[in-house]
Amino acid sequence: MEQFLNEFRDIVESARGNLLRLSAEQVTSHAPAKWSPKEIVGHLVDSAANNHQRFVRAQFTEDLICPPYDQESWVNAQKYCEAPWSDLVNLWAGYNLHLHHVIRVMPKDTLTRPRVKHNLDQVAWKAIDRDTPATLEYFVRDYVEHMKHHLQQILGAEFGNSYQTLN
């Protein structure tokens, strides 16, 4: 877990610097029916906000039943294309550094305890069958892999290749 946490922090810090170097044109352009880099980072802020409360609540429950959210509606409602890029990037980075702290201070048994009842077949990036027990550690690692996937969309595959798979 220590290596995972170190890499999580490194990804956030490295991505923040790389994202802030992108031009205004680069962060607002997008293909039809695709999110722009601003919208992707906004989505990652939403993901951090939703998973923050999921990770905290999971420490006090025996299950991993997490509320879903409509990602498209969240991005559309917040008009991330109109937000200042540096504010958006720094919000995303700060939130993820806080999540790094939250995960770091979780008791190991809370992270690794199998949860028979979960809905990670609906809310995880890489779903787990509902009949297969899941752990909070899996969900945390899945969150970071999801984040890494979207950072690769913006920064290119070479960014993601700098970090091994964190699962």
Image: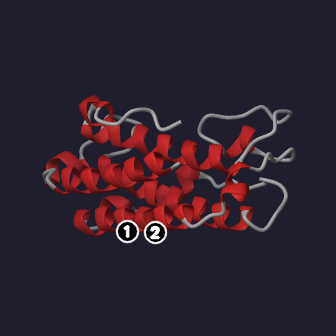
Taking the spot 32% from the left edge, 51% from the top edge, the residue there is 10
The answer to whether residue 9 is left or right of residue 64 is: left
* Disc 1 element: helix
Applied colour scheme:
secondary structure
| 129 to 14, vertically: above or below | above
Q: Is residue 142 left or right of residue 117?
A: left
- Identify which amino acid the numbered label 1 is placed on: Gly
Q: Residue at x 26, y 33 (%)?
A: 156
Q: Residue at x 39, y 33 (%)?
A: 164
Which mark is drawn over residue 94?
1
Q: Position of residue 82 (x, y in %)?
A: 30, 64
Q: Is residue 90 above or below residue 166?
A: below
- The residue lying toward the viewer, choosing from 135 and 121, is 135
Tell me, yes or no, if residue 39 can be seen here.
Answer: no
Q: Is residue 75 visible?
A: yes
Residue 141 is situated, as x and y percent measured from the top left of the image, at: 55, 44
Q: Secondary structure at mark 2?
A: helix
Residues under numbered marks 2 and 1 in contact, where contact means CB atoms less than 8 Å apart:
yes
Spot occupied by residue 85 in the image (x, y as percentages of width and height): 24, 62
Closest to the observer: 137 or 50? 137
Q: CA distance from mark 2 to mark 1?
A: 6 Å
Q: Is residue 58 left or right of residue 40?
A: right
| Residue 98 - label | 2
Q: Residues within 10 Å of mark 2 (few under 14, many from 20)?
A: few
